[in-house]
Each structure stands twice: as C-alpha cells, then as structure tokens.
Image (cartoon, grey):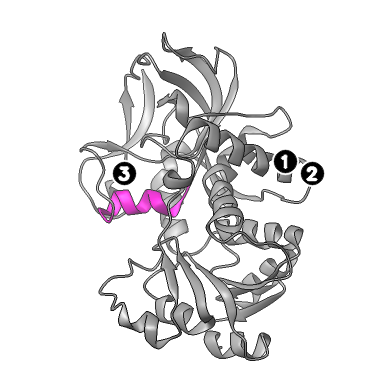
Amino acid sequence: MAKRIQFRAHGGPEVLEYVDYQPAEPGPKEVRVTNKAIGLNFIDTYYRSGLYPPPSLPSGVGSEGAGVVEAVGSDVTRFKIGDRVAYGSGPLGAYSDVHVLPEANLVKLPDAISFEQAAGVMLKGLTVQYLLRQTYELKGGETILFHAAAGGVGSLACQWARALGVKLIGTVSSAEKAALAKANGAWATIDYSHENVAQRVLELTDGKKVPVVYDGVGKDTWLTSLDSVAPRGLVVSFGNASGAVDGVNLGILAGKGSLYVTRPTLGTYANNAENLQRMADELFEMIISGKLTVEISQRFPLAEAAKAQTELSARRTTGSVVLLP
C-alpha cells in the first residue's frame, strides 16, 4: 500500500484526506513513478474548490512531480525502470507516494537537476516557457507587464525576461516582494496595494504602455491589464488566482484600442511528447546554465498538504513549494 492525498467533496483545504491506496499497474502506454518530490500549485486549489471539475470523486490532487520510474507498460519505448523523470501536467494524483502517468506526460530529467528543483519548476517553468517564448515571443528589448512578479511563476518570469534582455515591470503587494522581484531581474516594480498600476505603467513607458501583459491573477487585475496594454497589444490571461474572469463584453477591447486577449493553457502548447520534451529541455538548459535559479522556499511532508495549500492561498509563500512523500 502507498499513501496519497485525496478529496471526496469540494471545499477548503480541510477536505483533503491523507489515505492508504493501492497504486494501479501501468497500462500499455503508461509509466509508474515513485515520487521523490511533488510540486504545489494554485491549479491544485482550483480542482479542490470545484472551480475546475475533476474527472470523478473521490479525486487525487496535483499534477507535478519528479521521481524514478518503477514500472513501465508493455508499449512504453522512451523510458525504462530506474530512469529519472519529471512531469508537470497531470493526470491528477501527484500528491502521492507513487503515481501512474501516460508515457507522453513524462520528460527525461538530467542528472544536473535535482528532484526538488524539477518538482518545484516543471509546471511554473513550462508555463513561463510558453508565455515568453511562444504565446508572445519576446525578442529582447521589449518592456512588458507581469502580474504577481514575486510568486512562483513570476519569480521565474523575472529571471527569464532578464536573460532575454526584456524590461519586466512586475506588480507586487509589499516592499518585501518588490525587493524579491527586483533581485530576480524585474526592471521595475509596482506595489498595487498603494499605487495605481495602469498609471505607473504609463509613466514607466513614457506614455506608450506595453505590448503585452501577462496576467495570472484573473478577476482582480483584468481591467488593470486592459488599461496597461498599448493599442493592438495582447493581454495573456493565464490564471485565476483571484477568481475567474467572466462576463466579458468584447466591446471593451475595441474601446481600449483594438486589443487582443488569449487564455492559453500548458496542455495546448505541450500537446505531444516531442513538444513537451523540447520545452522542458529549454527550461532545464536555462537552469543548468545558471540563468534560472529555482528557489524552494518551503517544504512540507505530504501528510501536511492541507497546511501547504492554506499557506499558498493566503499568499504567504514565495518561489516554489514542494511536498515530500
């Protein structure tokens, strides 16, 4: 028997249960992984709360981790028992000692990357890869706005933008988080707790605004994002940390300058094994070269997943948080 975190009904962190379970045998194209470290992400709370419906209840939690292959299905060709692997896009159930995944969801993990680094960076790092390198391909020299610049995704985005020669303006909620974003490479920060973000963007860009805004906050920052982007610019709404953006009147895009909006997901970009491995290889190279540093700010035992999610939702974490089986 192994241990995992699951929930039987939607709700707050208190619905999470630490239970015994029997891991499944891998199907023909599946791999069973012994987790060495597990990533904690906002999307985990979306499934738990019911914002995103899980396939069924009771449901496992989590979609990111790293470990060692312990069993492979009959048709698996890319991995063998003992391989170091990582994953960042499900299926649900990563909060566990052992996890069974499709072969296509796994990437090979270089020896130079630790299990904790991989578990702390896969989902966030691959998100930054597609945001900065694919959704709006930054060439260098641009000035951009990135919300929640001291968070897990934001901290990596600050570093990656700096490596690309991009001026990243990051929004933060405190002087401490402003200092963190600056240390990670943000060109400028705006403390939304007492500054008008759109007005500061206007000042920082000499009235031009920015060609692209990356918004993982959602509901609370939607209008601010629209007011910060230049005419014919792009708002990339990639998360719902404050709640989902809804009730959108498309006419507002016309009124604010023929704006574009996209709501991307990692699964659409890492839509096959080849694309996923290519994206991961670029991410791993950024880490190995020293251009990206993965900061593991907190570690929790798997049994304390509810406490970890509580800290995350209360914005009391920075960088990456991992669970340890």
Confirm whether the magenta stretch covers residue 199: no
Amino acid bearing label 1:
Glu
For the residues labelled 1 and 2, the Cα–Cα distance comes to 6 Å
Amino acid bearing label 2:
Ser
- Which quadrant would residue 209 be assigned to in this image? bottom right
Coordinates of residue 98 in the picture (x, y in percent): 43, 24
Amino acid bearing label 3:
Leu
> Can the viewer see residue 224?
yes
Q: Give the range drawn in magenta.
A: 40-51
- To which residue does mark 1 refer? 285
- Whether 167 is drawn above or below 162: the answer is below
Residue located at (36% from left, 37% from top) = 92
Coordinates of residue 160 in the picture (x, y in percent): 69, 57
Residue located at (62% from left, 72% from top) = 144
> Can the viewer see residue 194?
no
Nearer the observer, disc 3 or disc 2?
Answer: 2
Nearer the observer, disc 1 or disc 3?
Answer: 1
Q: Are marks 1 and 2 in contact (CB under 8 Å)?
A: yes
Classify mark 1: helix, strand or loop: helix
Classify mark 3: helix, strand or loop: loop
Q: Magenta: predominant secondary structure element?
A: helix
Classify mark 2: helix, strand or loop: loop
Coordinates of residue 300 in the picture (x, y in percent): 52, 43
- To which residue does mark 2 refer? 289
Counting other residues with Cα less than 10 Å from the Cα at mark 1, is it few (<14), some (14-19), or many (20 or more)?
some
- Which quadrant would residue 282 be assigned to in this image? top right
Q: Are marks 1 and 3 in contact (CB under 8 Å)?
A: no
Residue located at (67% from left, 48% from top) = 294
Image quarter of the N terminus: top left
- Whether 293 is drawn above or below 24: the answer is below
- To which residue does mark 3 refer? 16
- Whether 274 is drawn above or below 157: the answer is above
